[in-house]
Image (tube, helix red, strand yellow):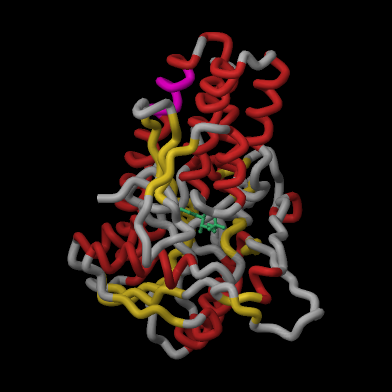
Amino acid sequence: MFKAIEWVESPQEAIRLLDQTALPSVEKYIDIIETASLVDAIQRLVVRGAPALGASGAYGVALAMSEAARNNWTKDQLQEAIQSVRDARPTAVNLAWGVDQVRDLVPDGIEAVLTAAHLIAEADVANNKKLSELGADWILKKTGKDKVRVITHCNTGGLATVGWGTALGIIRELHDRGALEIVYADETRPLLQGARLTSWELKQLGIDHFVEADGAASSTILRGLVDVAIIGADRITANGDTANKVGSVALALACQRAGIPFVVAAPASTVDLDTATGDGIHIELRTDSEVHEFQGMRATPEGVKGFNPAFDVTPFDLISAIATENGVAEPATANDPRVMETVVTR
Ligand code: MRU
């Protein structure tokens, strides 16, 4: 079984990452020993997915302390390095959350920070399993079906988390219960997290699936080929608005029209009660070369402009359910838009 992220002590203190840019053709691990390399790895999506970024944030603080000790950094240099990890990507709240969970422990030493980071990592797996059970229960009850056909977007499995997965965790849970018929995995342009990563995970798990072009998704829903859409989240605001990989909102709109549930799955650490609505979410704008090029080959005419927002926001009233480890909230039907408070305990 692979591990997307873990802390290792030998041959030296490092964060070991499964390089997700090389998958599915090459499975290689890299040891990160410098904060600047971690920031680079986060920005290049060597490690990615909101919960995995949460663990990266927490372990990143330990990494900065290890580097500080080797290089006799000042306190200011250490704090700058920690801040650079926190700011490496803006949309997934988990990254800043992970840093903030352990930052106050810095004066207590690296062991204290590592103990807290390990607890965050362990809790992520347990939380994902819990939310997967709750999400699967909700979906089977809501659809009234013994077996469901699912559409999903991006990658939300063990690669995007410390283990098990969120939306893909629910899919695994349904599969384990014998309640899954088929999965449609959107390829997820431009970086193909669905085609490269979700398909790689589903294949390993023996889960029957199609990979489809993103442009096929709304038609797959409207033609009645799926019973439910399940996606992950990078940030869920106090009213339930949800940022996730660009293309997610198109699924939500199609689900509303088709009258099938659109389910968001995320640990409570993805819920940002300090941000009122999706309008307050900083959407990462990535380099337009990701849109222009396909596997290093230019696909658009030289000189034209590209637009590459990495995420979009699905308004709460298009979301049938948000499954966290603390329960399932139904923002589309709840009278109180601040419904997320009911499933967040920190
Ligand atoms: O740019 P990425 O690959 O980090 O985007 C990831 C997503 O949008 C995921 O759906 C989200 O982080 C949830 S991962 C469990």
Coordinates of residue 103 in the picture (x, y in percent): 58, 22
Residue 117 is inside the magenta segment: yes
Q: Which residues are magenta?
A: 113-119
**The image quarter in which residue 172 lies:** bottom left
Q: Is residue 192 visible?
A: yes
Q: Residue at x 48, y 54 (%)?
A: 322
**Relative depth, front residue between 92 and 203:** 203
Residue 278: x percent and y percent? 69, 55
Quarter residue 17 falls in: top left
Name which residue lies at 27% across and 68% down: 203
Residue 327 can be seen in this image: no
Left or right for 283, reference 12: right
263 is within the stretch colored magenta = no
Q: Position of residue 241 (x, y in %)?
A: 63, 56
- Of 224 and 118, nearer the camera is 118
The relative height of residue 293 versus residue 342 in the rendered view (above or below) is below
